[in-house]
Image: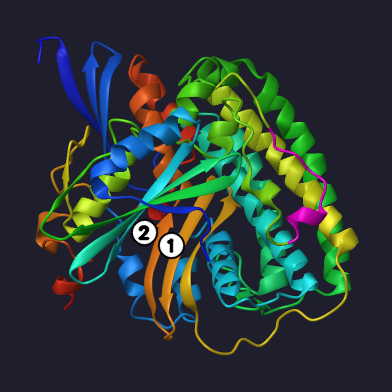
Amino acid sequence: MSDNRTVIPFGPQHPVLPEPIQLRLVVEDEKIIEVIPSIGYVHRGLEKLIEIKDFHQNIFVVERVCGICSFMHALTYCEAIESLMEVEVPIRAKYLRVIWAELHRIHSHLLWLGLIADSFGFESLFMQIWKIRETIMDLQEMTSGSRVIISTNVIGGVRRDIEKDMLVKITKSLDECQKSMNKVKKVFINDYTVKHRTVGKGVLSGEQAYEFGITGPTARASGINQDIRTTGYAAYGDLDFSSVVETQGDCYARMVVRLKEVFQSFDLIKQAIAKIPDGEISVPVKGNPEGEIVHRVEQPRGEVLYYIKANGTKHLERLRIRTPTFANIPLLLKAIPGSQLADVPVILLSIDPCISCTER
Amino acid sequence: MINNIVEVKKEYILAEVQKLKDNGYRFITSSCIDMGSEFMIYYHFDKNTEMKHLKIISSKEQEIVSISGIYLAGALAENEMKDLFGIKIKGLVLDYGGKFMITSDVGPAPFAKENES
């Protein structure tokens, strides 16, 4: 290594990192030359644990892959098993799944918007966003009994219903959130300091994003029109929406995509509430799964893939989980070299890293 | 059930992967299943939300070739397979030497069937 180069360990503990990941930064003066990510700090071997539990119990395991994407993990797992066992989920359950999934997406994006504001020192913005997020957490608690890991998915449907008065309350609460978000949105979009820290930082072109297999809002910020919800799982096929896409491929674009998706989720929940039919919320499931299946869902951070191999017993032979952050880590190898040391926290956070998901 | 599976001999995997790349497919991930005396490995790809899967079977003693020279994203999934299952992989463009996901006190290939405690 030349005399001007130093290796700086960024992480695994760092003030902007919500979870441990290490980036070994090869730095020349203040400029990053190379970055080598290092993970494994929160690997729990959940894919092995799943082989020991029975396939109904596995819902509780996959929910705990990550606290923020918890509902989507359970949704992906349940839909995969339902597909394998040819279980017809009631329509009402599909709409309820959409409502909870979009509430999760809102709370995840608001959490991230707060963290990104915190990463460039805008503490008051961080607090305003997290205050709005509290309303969403309260809605999750009202409808499921829990703020974070809501445990409402079962194989065959959902375990709880959302009554009419709760649906009305959700709509009113989301209207209040939307008013508050409209004020905060102007700061994210127009504020000089926010733009100074995000515009032109961590740029990834559409071609590079596609080649690296980047997914979710990170990919859509580089112009890739890809959203797994458009495949129509749950009740998404009945709802009217399109992917939120920006083209600049920088941290600002990734922030704008997530901001717009919050408003999109408000609209999706209202559509689901307007269209949700009466009926059953689950069906009984008999027997054991057999065969192989691959299923995908759009988590807040992007596409999650579940591969399941079942052998007709109550224990699965294999469950493989590819989470969106695992796919987005290669972005760091491309987007960070060439940038300044002070921009590393913002670029890293811009992929919305969920290390629990990455390592399982 | 999974549609669009193409089973290939492991000697031809690079050629098949290159074809998919030339046809605009995005690499999603690879999945390893321990079948006892051999590994079954899936490579999952996507184009416009349509998936395609390449499948190879490799005995546990033999090496497989890394696809990371074609899809860089493959390096992370292959390092994970190497750590957790002990698969021998040659040609990794970014090789963590068995220390990507697990630490040295864990013991080799914790997900492999012969190492189940």
Three-letter residue code for mark 1: Val
Image location of residue A24, percent across then percent down: 23, 31
Q: Secondary structure at mark 2?
A: loop
Magenta portion: prevailing SS class: loop
Q: Is residue A13 above or below residue A93?
A: above
Residue A65 badge: 1
**B31 left or right of A303 in image:** left
CB-based contact (under 8 Å), mark 2 and mark 1: yes
Which residue corresponds to the image point at 18% horizontal and 36% vertical from the top-left? B91
Residue A23 badge: none
Three-letter residue code for mark 2: Arg
Camera sees residue A55: yes
Whether labels 2 and 1 share one chain: yes
**Residue B35 lies in the magenta-colored region:** no
Q: Which residue is mark 2?
A: A360
- Residues A184 and A167: in front is A167
How far is disc 2 from disc 1 in space, using C-alphas? Answer: 6 Å
Q: Chain of mark 1?
A: A
**Residue A236 lies in the magenta-colored region:** yes
Q: Secondary structure at mark 1?
A: loop
* Image quadrant occupied by the C terminus of chain B: bottom left
- The stretch of residues the image draws in magenta is A235-244
Image location of residue A46, percent across then percent down: 35, 67
Camera sees residue A250: no
